Image (cartoon, rainbow, N blue to C red):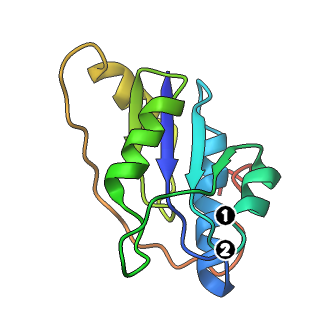
Amino acid sequence: MLTLFAVPKPFRGHISIIQRNAIRSWTLLRPACQIILFGDEEGTAEVAAEFGVKHVPDVARNEYGTPLVSDIFEQAQRLASHDLLCYINADIVLMSDFTAAVRRVAFRRFLLVGQRWDVDLDEPWDFEDPQ
């Protein structure tokens, strides 16, 4: 149904917990989404292996070392196993209503945007716990 792709920051300290929570939430979406993590930042390969998602370490960069968005999007389109693609920040937790929203609009031209809510999480989130 959907390919999610992101460029995580290095998996260090608090941002590691935040990004792991987010990526874990993506793996729980149904129907299952293809997930691609781009870049060679610290921990990205290990987290991709841990969650069983695709990792693409080689991304074109500008003279300052910043990954080029154009290259990320081109590679994502080439590697995607679904017609729908979603670029997402690696710290965004998605809930089940996300795929429901995508299904509602997927048959017409669309741009889907969301609102970010900051949640202070300093430990892995238990997605199985209803509270």
Judged left or right of residue 62, residue 75 is right
Please report the residue visible at 55 percent of the width from the left and 23 percent of the height from the top. Answer: 81
Q: Position of residue 121 (x, y in %)?
A: 59, 76
The answer to whether the residue labelled 2 contacts the one labelled 1, judged by CB atoms less than 8 Å apart, is yes
**Dot 1, crowdedness within 10 Å: few (<14), some or many (≥20)?**
many
Query: Which residue bears the numbered disc 2?
Result: 17
> Count the marks: how many?
2
Please report the residue visible at 42 percent of the width from the left and 33 percent of the height from the top. Answer: 77
Name the mark on residue 20. 1
Look at the picture and state if 16 lies above or below 84: below
Q: CA distance from mark 2 to mark 1?
A: 5 Å
**Dot 2, crowdedness within 10 Å: few (<14), some or many (≥20)?**
some
Judged left or right of residue 73, residue 24 is right
Q: Residue furthest bottom?
A: 13
Q: Position of residue 111 (x, y in %)?
A: 20, 36
Confirm whether residue 3 shows in the render.
Answer: yes
Which three-letter amino acid code belongs to the residue tagged 2? Ile
Q: Position of residue 112 (x, y in %)?
A: 25, 39
Q: Secondary structure at mark 1?
A: helix
Look at the picture and state if 122 lies above or below 105: below
Nearest the eye: 18 or 125: 18
Q: Position of residue 9 (x, y in %)?
A: 54, 73
Please report the residue visible at 66 percent of the width from the left and 42 percent of the height from the top. Answer: 27
